[in-house]
Amino acid sequence: MALIALVSAKSDGVTTAVSALALAGRRPVLLAELDMAGGSLRHGLLCHNPRGPHRELLDGRIGVHRLPLADWERAGGDGDFTPQVAEHLWPLDASDYRVALPGLTDPRQAPSLTGIWPTLLNVLQLTDQQLRWDVLVDGGRLAWDRGHLHPVLTPAPVLREADLVLLVVRASEAAQALAYPAVQALQAELAGAGRGCQSLGVLLVGDGYRNEEVGHALGAPVLASLPWDAAAAAYLASGGPMPRGVSRSRLMRAARDAMGPLREVADRRRLMLQINSAVPATPGIASMVQQLAARGGRHD
C-alpha cells in the first residue's frame, strides 16, 4: 500500500516508531532495517521470535549484510540471488504476514551494500505495489556528504524513491532545532530526485506541542504523531511475549490511527507524480514476490 521511510536528524526513536507502525495494524507488513549505523531489531524485538518448523532463533547469519555475499556467489553462474532475500526475512511476531529484514551487525558492512541497492529497492517496491503490503523502512540517522545524502552511511537510493519520507522528531526545542536544517536538506534532496519536497513529512514523538506549531516551525507538515509511552516503548525495544495491555496502549493506538492517513498521503503523492508501477527486474524477484504473496494470502 505504501513505501514509507523513517529517518532522524539525531537518535529520536526511529526504530521504536517504525516498529509500532508495523505491529499496530492487521495488514501484511515488510519492515526493512536499513540503518547504516547497524541494526538493533535483532537484539530486541526479533530475538525472541522463532522461525519455521524447527523454531530456529535469529543469529548473525541472517540479515541485509548477507545479501552482498549471495549476490557475489551467483555472479559466476546464471542464478539469481533475489530468492535469498526471502531467506533473510524474520517474523516480527507470531503471525506469518509481518516480517522484517534485519539490519547490519557492523557499520563497517555498509559499503558492501552499494551494489545491491537496485535489486533490494525493486523488491520493496513490488511488495508495496503488487502485493499491496505496507513497506516500512528504518533509515536510521541521517548523514550528509557535501549537502547530499551520504552514499554509504544512509540508504540514499531507497529514500529518494520512497513514496513518503518521515523525519522523526522528538517533542522538544532541542530536537526541533536539530531537525530544521535536516528538513531543508531533505526537501532539496527529494526535489532533486524528482519526488518533490512534499514527499517529506514529520512524525512527532512526544507530548506538549501541537502538530501545526511544529510543522510551521520546521517548514514541513506533521503527518503523524505518537505519544511517549514508556511501557510500550520498552516492549518494542526488548521484544518477547507482548505484555497485557500493550496492544491497547496509547502508543499502539496512535500508531494504528496513523497508518491509514499515511497510506492516503503516499497514494496521493504517487498519483500526483504519475509514478510508473515497478516491474520485476529478474525472474528471481518475481519468484520472491510470489512467496510473499502466499503469506499475505494466508492472512486474507
Image (spheres, rainbow, N blue to C red):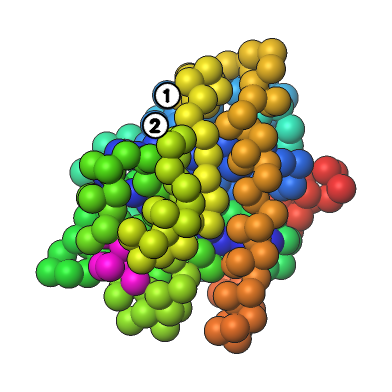
Q: Position of residue 60 (x, y in %)?
A: 40, 30
Q: Position of residue 177 (x, y in %)?
A: 23, 50
Residue 259 painted magenta: no
Q: Position of residue 33 (x, y in %)?
A: 45, 45
Dominant secondary structure, magenta: helix
Residue under the image location 22 percent in, 69 percent down: 148
Residue under the image location 57 percent in, 36 percent down: 20
Q: Position of residue 145 (x, y in %)?
A: 15, 64
Is 246 rendered above or below residue 279? above
Residue under the image location 48 percent in, 29 percent down: 228
Residue under pointer 1: 43
Secondary structure, mark 2, is: loop
Q: Between 109 and 43, which is closer to the camera in this rendering?
A: 43
Distance Cα–Cα, label 1 vs label 2: 5 Å
Q: Do the numbered discs 1 and 2 sit on residues whose CB atoms are within 8 Å?
A: yes
Q: In this view, which residue lies farthest toward the bottom?
A: 274
Work out whether residue 65 can be spotted: no
Is 247 rendered above or below residue 155? above
The magenta span reads: 182-187
- At label 1, which amino acid type do we have? His
Residue under pointer 2: 40
